[in-house]
Amino acid sequence: MNDLASSAFPLPSVDSDLGSIAKLPTRRLQTPEPEGIKRRKYRAIWISDVHLGTKGCNAELLIDFLDHTDSETMYLVGDIIDGWRLKKKFYWPAEHNDIFWRILKRARRGTRIVYIPGNHDEMFRQFTGLNFGGVEIRRAAFHDTADGRRLIVLHGDEFDAVMLAHRWLAFVGDTLYHVMMGLNHWVNKARRALGLPYWSLSKMAKHKVKNAVEFIGRYEEVVAKAAAERGVDGVICGHIHTAEFREFTHSGKTIEYWNDGDWVEGCNALVEHFDGRMEILNWPQEIAARDGQSDPRVHSEQTELEAA
């Protein structure tokens, strides 16, 4: 696995958001890793769009994921920490600290950790090429699968027309998005009280809005085309909070598009098995299967999303 040359991308100047990041507490784990759990082992794991520092982050689900999986390599594909929100209001509960320490512990155990900052944690892009506590910071990277495919790994905001041309609009959209996530929080608090599984209000809304569906489709095409122009077999990204696998054809060659989703709405991760097979995991469904739940409402809601 080779890293993409950082010179291919301009580095930002020092961002004032670092002041907020510097205030993050360094206390040890409040919830230690449970003992005696048989972890699923993968060759590689990709997660992105965790948005630590916001109330929308599904920290409990991500902690459960980290406690039940392991890998030779883990890619953190951007927006792990939400510097935009921390700059406005500092928020850092114990669960977010527990995620931070779990990732560092993986590095100490020998897992290769590659961190590719996104637009919400862009303040770390200035440290591209450096290594902090076993965490490699890269602008983008190449990953070679066990069966010989070469995939480029990047956050994906580089291909977001709103981010590139109308940055102010991206900030407005971010504010509206967090209002939606606040509603999502209360909806799921009520669902837990009723014994119902996690469900994403914002994900359902996004699938119902025609413009959002068209944007996602266009975004996927643009990212896949950019990967093809770099001569790779596919791309892995995040950014749009929509876990997906699609295949595109460019100059007669099939290009794989993988999006590893997020830990705000869908709670997804992308994994590579040791034979090179790739799989998108939906962790709420994995928990339901592990706990032996068979609630028909889970199937009904998933079916509605797929049909939307």
Image (tube, rainbow, N blue to C red):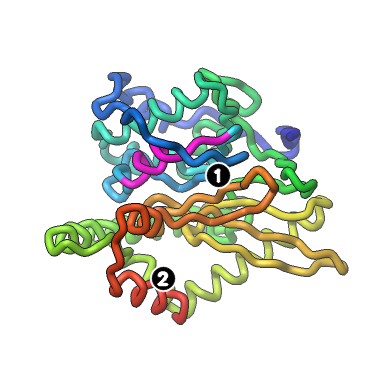
State the image coordinates of residue 7 (x, y, percent, origin top left).
Answer: 74, 33
- Residue 24 as seen in the image, left or right of residue 182: right
Question: Disc 1 residue type?
Answer: Trp
| Front one among 139 and 67 | 67
Question: Disc 2 residue type?
Answer: Lys
The numbered disc on residue 206 is 2
* Predominant secondary structure, magenta span: helix
Q: Closer to the camera: disc 2 or disc 1?
A: 1
> Residue sitting at 52 percent across and 31 percent down?
124
Q: CA distance from mark 2 to mark 1?
A: 23 Å
Say above or below: 59 vs 174: above
> Residue sitting at 38 percent across and 26 percent down?
101
Say above or below: 226 vs 12: below
State the image coordinates of residue 256 (x, y, percent, origin top left).
Answer: 71, 60
Q: Is residue 246 visible?
A: yes
Q: Which residues are magenta?
A: 61-71
